[in-house]
Each structure stands twice: as structure tokens, then as C-alpha cells.
């Protein structure tokens, strides 16, 4: 039977629920985790969870995600639904691979989501020396990377670690403190070379690409940052120092140097904000950006058909492929061109 991809993925998750690999209360993969594990679009992932919800197998839980409902495991089972082909699975079971029925810890990077070992849960107590700020922050970053900042909560992180929520407060003051430490961890991944490459333009371009890659890895980070009320993130200052040093000794006054740095940083951050917004929009609508634009074509053409916007009407008639990477590259080069004019003028003076 040739089922569509969403139905095949839903069938595999349904089989896990009916076999008892996933039991009531266990979290099933989020839409983002489904896209990563099975390599499908967000719209397909949304249909998977929608299908399971319609069957009453799963239910959404605020702050946790989608979990197996109390009546999720069907009595008597019935014939198992067909599993998806290997091309649609994140990884096919290989020889020697662990039994999928085995009890394992769940993490955001392990969407197999078998039930946790109750003995491990009992061993983890608020005074457990294995529970450290570093582990808490790492788990929080993993949750935010896959489920967005809106899906992050102290309870969600505690669930990920298999500990009581209150035990986190022995190491983290509150959610604001947690997000601040997550930012510090993300910026700490940025590595700038000690051997300075080229001149100021090469350095700023490298800095911008390094920041862009960081925002791509952590889409939640750009919306969490503020430019008008910057948070005290120690690791971020290392990048700022590196960028400011690139502009030093070119004749710019201190105010212009700082403004140049902030302008470049805000450009990268402002473009990266759309990464999280687009992921959220796909999760809500079930459509990626291209599919959503297709639904708007008729409305847009009716607006411009009156002839009030002739240039725009002519341009949208051409084939234009919007891509955030291309937008970032184009804007970065134009911004650097402007800085070059600024620096050359300072040299002349």
C-alpha cells in the first residue's frame, strides 16, 4: 500500500503506541523533531500530529509538548499499520542496533522517545551531584533548538532531565536566568581566529558569517536578544571586542566605531529573527513559506490588477525565488560597501 509520507510516519508512531513502546504521558516527537528525523517538510510533520490527535492517540500539554493520551494504547491492538520505508526514517535499524522496546532516556536529540527508566528517576534527587548548571543549560538549549523559545519552561527542562522541577532552582534562579545562561552558551560556540585575516572588511565579513551560523544553529536566540536593552552576556563581548578591534586605527571616532559594530550585529540578528518566526508559522499553518505564498497569489494579483502599482505588478510577473540565505548575503555585501565608503572618508580626513 502506497501511503503518503505523513500517513506512513503516523503509522510508525501509532505502532509504537500500540506496542507499548510509547505509554500514556510519554512525549512524542514534536513537528521540528519529525522534520529532522524523517527529513520531511514542516507541513508533513504537522499532518502527522494532527492525524494522531484525530484518532485520540495523543494530546497537547502546555509546556511539555504532545504526549500519548490516556487511551493511547488500544486494547487488543489489532493489525499493526504499515511502517514507512527506510527512505522516510531518520535511521534504519541495523544489525546490532538496540531493541526499540528497550527502556532508554529521552532527550531532544533522541526522538525514539522510549519510556524512561523509573529506577533512574528515583536515583535523581534534588541533591544529585550529576545535576549541574551546565547540564541544565545544555538541556534547555536542546529543547529551544527543537521546539522554540515558546516551548521552553523550567518544567519542560526538568522533564528532559528526568528530575523534579524544583530541583532546577538549586542551580538556576528562574527562567530569565536560564535564558541568559543559554545565550552565553550559544555565543561561547563562536570562535574567532587569533591570527587576524586580511583587513577590516575580511574580519567583519568573517564575524558576520560566524554570527549567522550561530543563529542558524539556534533559531530561538535572535528573538531572545535585545539591541536596545542588551543583556549582559559575557561570551558575546568576545565577538564584540574582535569586531571593534577590526575597526580600530582606521580614523573612526569611538561613537562611529560602536555604531558600525551595532549596525552590523543588528543586521545579522534582524535577518535571523525570521528563522524562528518562519518555523513557528509553519507549525501553526502547516505550510512552508513557498506553499503559503501560493495561497496568497490570487489575492495579491487582485490587489495589483487595478494598475495602481505598475512596477510591482511587472516584477511579480517574473520568476523570483525568495531565499533567506541569498537575502543575508546580498545585504551583508551592501552593508560592507557602505562601511568602506565611511572608512575611506575617515582616512582622507
Image: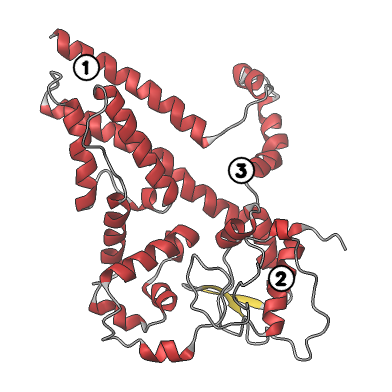
Left/right of residue 285 with respect to residue 224 in the rendered view: right
Q: Nearer the viewer, mark 3 or mark 2?
A: 2
Judged from the image, the secondary structure of the residue bearing numbered disc 1 is helix
| Location of residue 50 with respect to 212 vertically, above or below | below
Q: Which residue is mark 2?
A: 12
Give the crowd class for mark 3: few <14, some 14-19, many >=20 residues within 10 Å. some
> Residue 79: horizontal and vertical position, in percent?
83, 81
> Residue 250: horizontal and vertical position, in percent?
15, 19
Give the crowd class for mark 1: few <14, some 14-19, many >=20 residues within 10 Å. some
| Location of residue 191 with respect to 195 vertically, above or below | below
Q: Earlier in the sequence, mark 3 or mark 2?
A: 2
> Residue 258: horizontal and vertical position, in percent?
18, 32
Q: CA distance from mark 1 to mark 2?
A: 59 Å
Left/right of residue 221 with respect to residue 250 in the rendered view: right
Label annotation for residue 343: 1
Left/right of residue 45 with respect to residue 7 in the rendered view: left
Q: Which residue is mark 3?
A: 289
Q: Nearer the viewer, mark 3 or mark 1?
A: 1
- In depth, the one of 43 and 5 nearer the eye is 5
- In depth, the one of 256 and 183 nearer the eye is 183
Judged from the image, the secondary structure of the residue bearing numbered disc 3 is helix
Amino acid at each position: 500500500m502506497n501511503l503518503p509520507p505523513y500517513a506512513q510516519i503516523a503509522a510508525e508512531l501509532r505502532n509504537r503506541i500500540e506496542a507499548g513502546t510509547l505509554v500514556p504521558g510519554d512525549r512524542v516527537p514534536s513537528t521540528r523533531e519529525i522534520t529532522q528525523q524523517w527529513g520531511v517538510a514542516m507541513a508533513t510533520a504537522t499532518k502527522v500530529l494532527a492525524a494522531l490527535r484525530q484518532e485520540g492517540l495523543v494530546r497537547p500539554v502546555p509546556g511539555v509538548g504532545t504526549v500519548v493520551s490516556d487511551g493511547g494504547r488500544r486494547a487488543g491492538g489489532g493489525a499493526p499499520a504499515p511502517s514507512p520505508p527506510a527512505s522516510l526514517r531518520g535511521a534504519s535499524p541495523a544489525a546490532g542496533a538496540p531493541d526499540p522496546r528497550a527502556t532508554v532516556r529521552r532527550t531532544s536529540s533522541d526522538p525514539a522517545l522510549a519510556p524512561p527508566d523509573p529506577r533512574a528517576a528515583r536515583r535523581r534527587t534534588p541533591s544529585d551531584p550529576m545535576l549541574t548548571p551546565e547540564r541544565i543549560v545544555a538541556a534547555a538549549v536542546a529543547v529551544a533548538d527543537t521546539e522554540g523559545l515558546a516551548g521552553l519552561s523550567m518544567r519542560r527542562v526538568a522533564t528532559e532531565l528526568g528530575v523534579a522541577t524544583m530541583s532546577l532552582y538549586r542551580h538556576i534562579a528562574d527562567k530569565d536566568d536560564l535564558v541568559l545562561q543559554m545565550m552565553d552558551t550559544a555565543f561561547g560556540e563562536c570562535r574567532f581566529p587569533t591570527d587576524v585575516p586580511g583587513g577590516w572588511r575580511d574580519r567583519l565579513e568573517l564575524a558576520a558569517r560566524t554570527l549567522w551560523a550561530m543563529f542558524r544553529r539556534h533559531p530561538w536566540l535572535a528573538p531572545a536578544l535585545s539591541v536596545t536593552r542588551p543583556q549582559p552576556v559575557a561570551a558575546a563581548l568576545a565577538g564584540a571586542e574582535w569586531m571593534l578591534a577590526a575597526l580600530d586605527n582606521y580614523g573612526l571616532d569611538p561613537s562611529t566605531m560602536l555604531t558600525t559594530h551595532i549596525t552590523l550585529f543588528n543586521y545579522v540578528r534582524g535577518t535571523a529573527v525570521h528563522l524562528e518566526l518562519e518555523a513557528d508559522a509553519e507549525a501553526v499553518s502547516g505550510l512552508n513559506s513557498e506553499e503559503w505564498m501560493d495561497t496568497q497569489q490570487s489575492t495579491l494579483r487582485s490587489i495589483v490588477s487595478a494598475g495602481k502599482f505598475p512596477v510591482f505588478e511587472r516584477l511579480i510577473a517574473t520568476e523570483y525565488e525568495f531565499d533567506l540565505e541569498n537575502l543575508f548575503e546580498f545585504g551583508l555585501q551592501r552593508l560592507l560597501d557602505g562601511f568602506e565608503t565611511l572608512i575611506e572618508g575617515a582616512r582622507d580626513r
